[in-house]
Image (cartoon, rainbow, N blue to C red):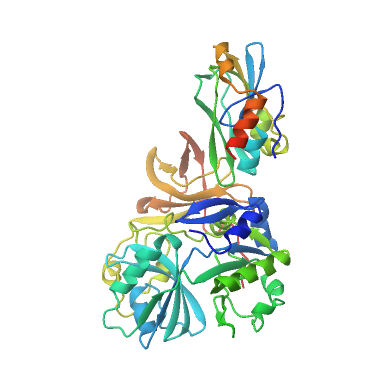
């Protein structure tokens, strides 16, 4: 499948790759420059492949709260919330952001690779809730405009007139139907813009004309890893609960019944998600972590950090080794020393 | 369009080879460096390591990817380019100046299997 911006990506010289069935730009001219544009200026990502579900009706907030582990009933209207979506065993089906317009209207944005699986799961579990559920993924395009100069760049754009300088994780709906959320996946300030394809096509052109750097999925992955945001399929999957991979903060065991609550209440974490840096060598997903000559974990995401110019990694380590600080990484049968860090590798500048 | 130098041999893995007597010098082509993007790490073998043609002798890594390096020729490593291990970005600056290893060949006939500049140019065109 192609997003509505496909031709524009190709015209800008993007290298296109298949991602979850979509032909997406992985990189335009230079990955490093794309990362730095977002850290220091402003960049734009086409993330139209992601899925959008609309939940409406009197029980919308109650129903979504039953589906996810985080607490959306407590959240104010006009705000967004990050949450895992679990099955009855407490294992992670996907991670998502839920945008609460009101108790009766919620937009859910899910990973492209999980759209069908997630929508079926939502549909199967509507039970007696008085809600209407719509998969609008084909009707919406999505741009992520990210970087410290985002607001000053986009406030002049006529299509976005009425846009307010709002708080992080707040959402706004403009008169023309465009939905803007001050969210993103880079750690920097920025907006994600949901709108029908023809509007997004115009907005993309406006942004490029204003000198906003087009950025691909490659730089997006480096940016999210530098600030330690998990990626479904890497840090998160259906063999893990949120308690195994650093998402205990999104798991509200004190709220009323939700799917996975029973399983998670008694669950003892088996693994811990840790952060590592390397002075030499570049860690990659799948490389083994070694302690006392035994494999005790695995890198889930690894890269060279553009900001730090050294190897960085997220890794899942067996719980017994959660505090062990002399882990080595096996890179092509050679062992490399690692340094454990507790804070994200790069501190993003979001509001 | 990437640069292709005359008087060198080439492989389908986008490596260049220069031959002097029974000594081969190997590097990656301009096409390869430009497809990889910023090269940030290179791992090369120690002297005296021996390889058969088709063996992997090292890796070159960009920010996002790891690529194996393959030797099209059998032989023994005489020397690796320490300067490139220290400063891998030099491959991006000038791929044809950034040699990786020198090999003492054990079967000089294998050179006949390599592409010349003209054949490599056509190979790149057909595969781009």
Q: Is residue A192 above or below residue B51?
A: below
x 40%, y 56%: residue: A272
Left of B65 or right of it: where is A63? Answer: left
Q: Residue at x 37, y 73 (%)?
A: A68
Foreground of the two, A260 or A195: A195
Q: Is residue B80 left or right of residue A259?
A: right
- A70 vs B122, nearest the viewer: B122
Reply above or below: A156 against B51.
Answer: below
Find the residue positioned furthest to the bottom.
A58
From the top left corner, tell me how far across and down residue A50 is, in percent.
Answer: 48, 65
How far across and down, in percent of the image, does residue A319 sit? 36, 54
Query: Is residue B28 in view?
Result: no
Which image quarter is the C terminus of chain A in?
bottom right
Residue A96 occupies which quadrant of the picture? bottom left
Considering depth in this image, is A349 or B111 the residue closer to the camera? B111
Quadrant housing residue A86? bottom left
**Residue A298 makes an appearance in the image:** yes
How far across and down, in percent of the image, does residue A9 sit?
61, 57
* Total numbered labels: 0
Question: Could you tell me residue B50's position as x and y percent?
Answer: 52, 18
Judge from the rendering whether residue A56 lies leftward or rightward of residue A91; answer left or right. right
């Amino acid at each position: 499948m192609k997003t509505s911006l496909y031709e524009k990506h190709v015209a800008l010289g993007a290298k296109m790759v298949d991602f979850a069935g979509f032909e997406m730009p992985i990189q335009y001219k230079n990955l490093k420059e794309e990362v730095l544009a977002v850290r220091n200026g402003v960049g734009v990502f086409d993330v139209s492949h992601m899925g959008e579900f609309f939940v409406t009706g009197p029980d919308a907030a109650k129903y979504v709260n039953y589906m996810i582990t985080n607490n959306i009933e407590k959240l104010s209207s006009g705000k967004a919330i990050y949450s895992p979506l679990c099955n009855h065993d407490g294992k992670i089906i996907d991670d998502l952001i839920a945008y609460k317009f009101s108790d009766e209207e919620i937009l859910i944005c899910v990973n492209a690779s999980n759209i069908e699986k997630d929508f079926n799961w939502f549909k199967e579990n509507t039970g007696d809730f008085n809600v209407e559920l719509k998969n609008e993924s084909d009707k919406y395009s999505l741009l992520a405009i990210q970087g410290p100069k985002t607001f000053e760049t986009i406030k002049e754009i006529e299509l976005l007139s009425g846009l307010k300088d709002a708080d992080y994780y707040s959402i706004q709906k403009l008169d023309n139907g465009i939905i803007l959320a001050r969210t993103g996946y880079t750690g920097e300030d920025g907006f994600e813009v949901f709108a029908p394809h023809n509007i997004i096509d115009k907005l993309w052109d406006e942004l490029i004309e204003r000198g906003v750097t087009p950025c691909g999925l490659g730089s997006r992955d480096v940016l999210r890893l530098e600030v330690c945001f998990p990626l479904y399929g890497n840090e998160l999957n259906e063999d893990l609960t949120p308690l195994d991979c650093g998402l205990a903060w999104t798991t509200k065991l004190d709220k009323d019944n939700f799917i996975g609550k029973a399983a998670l209440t008694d669950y003892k974490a088996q693994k811990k998600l840790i952060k590592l840096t390397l002075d030499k060598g570049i860690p990659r997903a799948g490389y083994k972590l070694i302690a006392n000559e035994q494999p005790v974990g695995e890198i889930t995401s690894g890269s060279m950090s553009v900001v730090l110019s050294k190897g960085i990694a997220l890794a899942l380590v067996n719980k017994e080794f959660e505090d062990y600080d002399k882990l080595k990484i096996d890179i092509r049968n050679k062992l490399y020393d690692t340094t454990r860090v507790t804070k994200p590798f790069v501190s993003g500048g979001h509001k | 369009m990437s640069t292709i130098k005359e008087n060198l041999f080439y492989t389908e893995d986008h490596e260049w080879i220069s031959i002097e007597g029974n000594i081969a010098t190997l590097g990656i082509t301009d096409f390869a460096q430009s497809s990889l993007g910023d090269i940030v790490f290179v791992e090369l073998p120690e002297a005296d390591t021996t390889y058969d043609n088709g063996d992997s002798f090292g890796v070159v890594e960009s920010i996002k990817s790891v690529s194996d390096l393959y030797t099209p020729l059998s032989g023994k490593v005489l020397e690796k380019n320490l300067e490139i291990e220290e400063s891998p970005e030099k491959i991006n600056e000038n791929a044809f100046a950034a040699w990786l290893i020198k090999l003492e060949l054990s079967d000089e006939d294998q050179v006949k299997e390599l592409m010349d500049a003209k054949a490599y140019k056509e190979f790149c065109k057909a595969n781009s």
